[in-house]
Structures are given as C-alpha cells and as structure tokens.
Amino acid sequence: MSSASFPMSRKRLSALTVSKRWKKVSHQLHTRKLLFEKRKRISDFALAVGMLGIIIMIIENELASAGVYTKSSLYSFSLKAVISFTTMILLVSVMIYHSFEVQIFLIQNCVNDWRIAMTWQRIIQMSFELLICAIHPIPGEPYFFWKTNHTIDVTLGLPMLFRFYLIGRAMHLHKYSTIHISSIVFSLVLFLIVGCDDNKLFTDTTSRSIGAFNNIAFDTRFIFKTLMAIYPGTVLLVVVGSLWIVASWTMRQCERYYDEEYNNLLNTMWLIMITFLTIGYGDMFPKTYCGRSISVATGFMGAGCTALLVAVILKKMELTQAEKRVHDLMRDTQFTKELKNAAANVLRESWLIYKYTKLVKRVNPGRVRNHQRKFLQAIHSMQNAKMKHRNLMDDLHVRNNPYNNMDDQNAANKITSEIYTRQNILEERLSSLENKLVVLQETLATLPEEISRHLTMTQLNNSSRNPGHTLFS
C-alpha cells in the first residue's frame, strides 16, 4: 500500500465517524420527539380519567344525598367500583408519565443509567402525586363519628378535588395538533382567561424557544404569573369564582349530615361568600370540624384575594408612560402660568405702591397698606409657584434618570468596580511588558560586542590548532 492511500483512508474514517455521530444525534432527536408526544398523550389520558372520577364521585354523592338510593345499595357500590377502577388507571398513567419524564431526562443529558435521574425531589414529587391520586371513596357504607355520624365518603371524596392539578400540567404540555379531552378543558380555561385570539400564546413553538434560550420553564407557575400580569382582572375573577363554587360544594358535603339547612347549595354559597369577605353575620356557621376547616381556609383565601384585588385596582389606576408625559406637560404648563401671573401681580402691586405714595398729592395710608399686603401675597405666591415647578423638574429628573433605582445603582457600581480592576490588571501587564522590552533592548545593545568577541575567540582557537598554516599565510 502506498503512502498516498493513508490520507484517503483517514478522510474516509473521519467521514464515517461524522456520519455515525449525525445518525446518533438524529436518532436521539427523533426519540425525544416521540417521547414528547407520548408524554402529552398520557397526560391527556390521565386528565380525562381524573376528571371522570371526580364527576362520578359528585354524581354518587348528590344522588345519595337526594335520597335516590342509599349508600348500601347496589347502585352506590357500582359507582364507587367505577371510581376505584378509574383511580387504578390514573395511578398507572401517572407512573407511565413519570417514566417518560425520566427517559426524556436521560436523552437530554446523554445519560444511560436511569437511577441518575431519580433524585430525591423527583421521588418526593412522584410519591406525593400518587398519594393524591390514590385517595377515593371505597365501595361500601363505612361511617365514623366527627361531631356527628359521617360517611367516610366525605373524607375520601373531597381530596379527589386535588386532581385538578392535572389541568395545570396540560396547560404547558398540550398543543392544538390533536383533539383530546384535555384540549377541551385547556381551551375552555384559556378562553375564559385570555380569549380565543391569544390561546396559542403559551403553546407556540417560538414562545417556547425564546423561553428555552432564556432558561425559563413554561410551567404552570410561569403561565399563571404571566396571565396575572396581562389579564389580572379576568384571572382573579376566574380564580375567585372557581374557589367559591368548590368551597360551597365541599361545605355542603361536610355540614349536610348535621343540619338540613345546608342541603341547599345557595345557603352554603351565602356562608362561603360572607366568610370570604370576612363579614360573618352569624346567621349561619359551621358545626363540624370539616366545615370549620373549610371556613378557615376560605378566610385565608379571602384575605389573599383581597390583597390581589387591591394590587389589581392600583395597577389599573396607574398612569401609563404616555399619560404620565401628558400629565407632566399639563403640570408644567400650569405652574409656568402661575409663576407668570404671580410675577405680573408683583410688578402691578409695586407700581401701585409707587403710584399711591409718590404720584399723588395726598397719600392714603389705608390704600397703600392694602397694596403692600397684596404685594407680599404676590411674592409668596411666586415663591410657591417656583417651588412647585422645581419639585416637578426634580421628579422628572429622577424618573428619567436610568440610575434612579437602587438595583441599577448597584449594577453600575459593580460594573465600575470591575472596569477599575481590569484597568489595574492591564496597567500591571503593560509595566511588565515595558520592563521586558528594556531588558530586550539592553540585550540587543550588547549583541554586537558579544558577536565580535565570539569571532575573535574563534580565530584564536583556529590559529592555535594550525600554526604552520598561519606562518605560511
């Protein structure tokens, strides 16, 4: 084999290596895309199964409370068996969802061992999620004593409402490419909040790419904060309405076995509303520990929503930048007019004082005192107008100054300190470079002498080695 064949074989080998790498990367991207699609579908399926279990639980409780059948009847047992079956399917779906999450983590981080992805945060999250989804009314008619005889269906049925967290998961996983049950729920939620024109704000690929470049996760928390910033009133209305309805129904389930007055949903809605608004007329009050717990939670929710409402109102009443500029221009014009009028009054009263003291035959002291009083008032008004105009200019200067914020000042000080440090380092390097240049210059200056000395020594050595040749020459 000739030597020219070696470069060709190396090129072919490098080409094969690059081709294998590209195939591996394309395979990983394709696998990740499939896992994303499977994760979305299993999330949709889990949401549908979870909502089905909640609906059947509500229907079973309402039919039993209305006296259509008893808790010991076959109908109640059958509905609870269906709830148990949907719960088992939901648990399996949640486990499959987290398995897809682990596979996506392995592909994105180029890891082969799945145990690396099982951090204690992920384990706690999975355990807590499985615990929430596992709670459901069991078939049968068990009772327990809690201020009065309660069916255990209330204790096991109300925590099923925590399954609504699956809607939040669908809000940042679902896209409008296919039609599922979760797409209907997700569309209704976003339609109530942002309207039909902005539904693709959080599911657009461009938006998610921008978030990925800025290391921002499009999770439920980010979506809620963004919607609260863009549509605060609508989001607050939807949240308060949902909490009102859910709390009213849960209060009814807790208190209906103790007092028949709570069988009417409107009465519990009235109780929740006066508790939410921290009014408390005292005409109705909960008598069970379950109802009292819900009342305490409602009071805390009312205080939080009231604070949010005040913040929303203040934000709505705040002037925009354009409105602030117009308002500042109006105030500037007003203060300028007041200053001019005050200066004109000072000149007028000065002229009148001079007129009634110097240009008249008989001085009227009362009239002179009156104009002197007006003269002092005009001076005071002019000073106030100047002060108002000066305060306005100071406010505009502070507002337009880019370093009026403490954070901006700290950032500017940090940048200045860093520039100063780098300047000192640069000066040290320049001084070191100058010293090296001086040493190099001195070395170059002594170089001719060293060369001549070296040549002389070489000639002497040659002459000592060949004395006959030197005499002949």
Image (tube, helix red, strand yellow):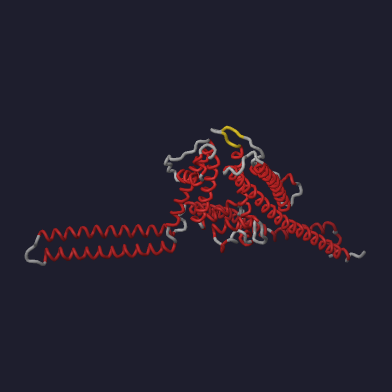
Residue 163 visible in the picture: yes
Give x and y (percent) for residue 172.
Answer: 62, 55
- Decide which of 279, 350 is in the foreground and name it: 279
Q: Quadrant of the N terminus?
A: bottom right
Q: Which residue lies furthest to the left in this view?
A: 362
114 sits to left or right of 224: right
- Decide which of 268, 205 is in the foreground and name it: 268
Above or below for 297 versus 431? above
Give x and y (percent) for residue 332.
Answer: 35, 63
Q: Residue furthest right?
A: 1
143 sits to left or right of 116: left
Total marks drawn? Answer: 0
Give x and y (percent) for residue 444.
Answer: 67, 60
Q: Which residue lies furthest to the front in this view?
A: 68
Give x and y (percent) for residue 49.
Answer: 67, 50
Residue for point 48% across, 53% down: 409
Q: Quadrant of residue 20?
A: bottom right
Q: Quadrant of the C terminus?
A: bottom right
Residue 125 visible in the picture: no
6 sits to left or right of 96: right
Residue for point 11% across, 59% down: 366
Q: Quadrant of residue 170?
A: bottom right
